[in-house]
Image (spheres, helix red, strand yellow):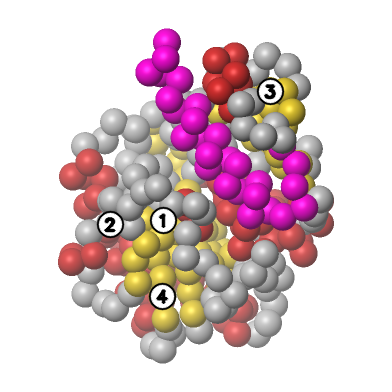
């Protein structure tokens, strides 16, 4: 089997704040990835794995610290950011270290693509987080998401959208920058059970891709973004085909979700520059 792993920071064990030292972030993300790869390769000894470093500028994972073979997408910018490198050759995707969308109550480090600029993202009228956006993208290639790890707020928001996906809750979200960390040894054994169950269901052909399970996210697509302020909406509205809904809200439509994904990534980068204009 061929697996695609997208790994973020906010939902990995050990983190609680955006200002965690980078050395510590790299250590914790690399360790959680190593544990996941060890488990995956123990269960599926012939697994082929590609990992996408999906936090910030994508320079967090320390591949030299991991003692198994895998491919790694690293660095920034990229056209498809957290899902860069995914194609139809993959059998399944896994999301590691994910978090709740912006605005979700008690969500630890809650945000959706941009912690500084986005107040809400809707696709086809439904509020979504990074798990849902990235899973819609995976559906373009009929790739199911079989395993997701992250905090309890992520599970509360996203689990209804992923009926067969195995979730590993790494910590209890207590507030924007507060968590209760679970015992690490117990998490390791729980991870083994969850991944083993996910692969068994995959081998048995039980998984559908995300859009099959959630047809509201079928094309045509409309993305609506609520921005932090009018300056960011002004900047994003310069792009062609953007509809300005009101002072802080913009919309963009396309039949191809690749366009939607690129629009979200481009909007986050453009809005990020607002700080240099004020």
Q: Residue 48's spot in the image, x, y percent?
A: 42, 81
Q: CA distance from mark 4 to mark 2?
A: 15 Å
Quick check: marks 4 and 1 in contact, CB under 8 Å?
Answer: no
**Figure check: 45 above or below 14:** below
Q: Judge by depth and name the residue closer to the eye, 136 or 12.
A: 136
Give the foreground label among 1 and 3: 3
Q: Which residue position holds label 4?
A: 49
Magenta extent: 252-278
The numbered disc on residue 249 is: 3
Q: Mark 3 falls on what kind of element?
A: strand
Q: Residue at x 26, y 35 (%)?
A: 20
**Figure check: 20 above or below 38:** above
Across the whole image, how many numbered discs are drawn on residues?
4
Quick check: marks 4 and 2 in contact, CB under 8 Å?
Answer: no
Q: Residues within 10 Å of mark 3 (few under 14, many from 20)?
A: many
- Residue 56 found in image quarter: top left
**Figure check: 9 above or below 167:** above
């Amino acid at each position: 089997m061929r697996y695609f792993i997208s790994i973020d920071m906010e939902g990995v064990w050990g983190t609680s704040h955006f200002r965690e030292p980078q050395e510590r972030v790299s250590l914790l993300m690399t360790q959680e990835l190593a544990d996941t790869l060890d488990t995956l390769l123990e269960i599926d000894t012939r697994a082929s794995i590609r990992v996408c470093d999906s936090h910030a500028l994508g320079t967090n994972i320390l591949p030299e610290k991991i003692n198994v073979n895998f491919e790694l997408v690293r660095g920034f910018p990229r056209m498809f950011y957290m899902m860069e490198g995914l194609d139809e050759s993959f059998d399944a995707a896994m999301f590691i270290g994910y978090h709740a969308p912006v605005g979700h109550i008690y969500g630890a480090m809650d945000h959706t693509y941009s912690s500084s600029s986005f107040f809400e993202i809707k696709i086809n009228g439904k509020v979504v987080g990074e798990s849902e956006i990235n899973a819609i993208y995976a559906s373009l290639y009929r790739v199911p998401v079989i395993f997701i790890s992250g905090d309890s707020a992520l599970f509360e928001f996203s689990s209804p959208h992923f009926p067969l996906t195995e979730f590993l809750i790494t910590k209890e979200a207590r507030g924007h920058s507060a968590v209760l960390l679970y015992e690490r040894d117990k998490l390791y054994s729980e991870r083994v059970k969850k991944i083993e169950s996910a692969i068994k269901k995959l081998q048995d052909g039980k998984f559908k891709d995300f859009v099959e399970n959630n047809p509201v996210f079928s094309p045509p697509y409309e993305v609506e973004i609520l921005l932090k302020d009018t300056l960011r909406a002004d900047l994003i509205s310069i792009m062609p085909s953007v509809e300005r809904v009101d002072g802080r809200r913009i919309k963009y439509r396309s039949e191809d979700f690749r366009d939607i994904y690129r629009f979200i990534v481009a909007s986050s980068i453009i809005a990020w520059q607002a700080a240099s204009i004020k």
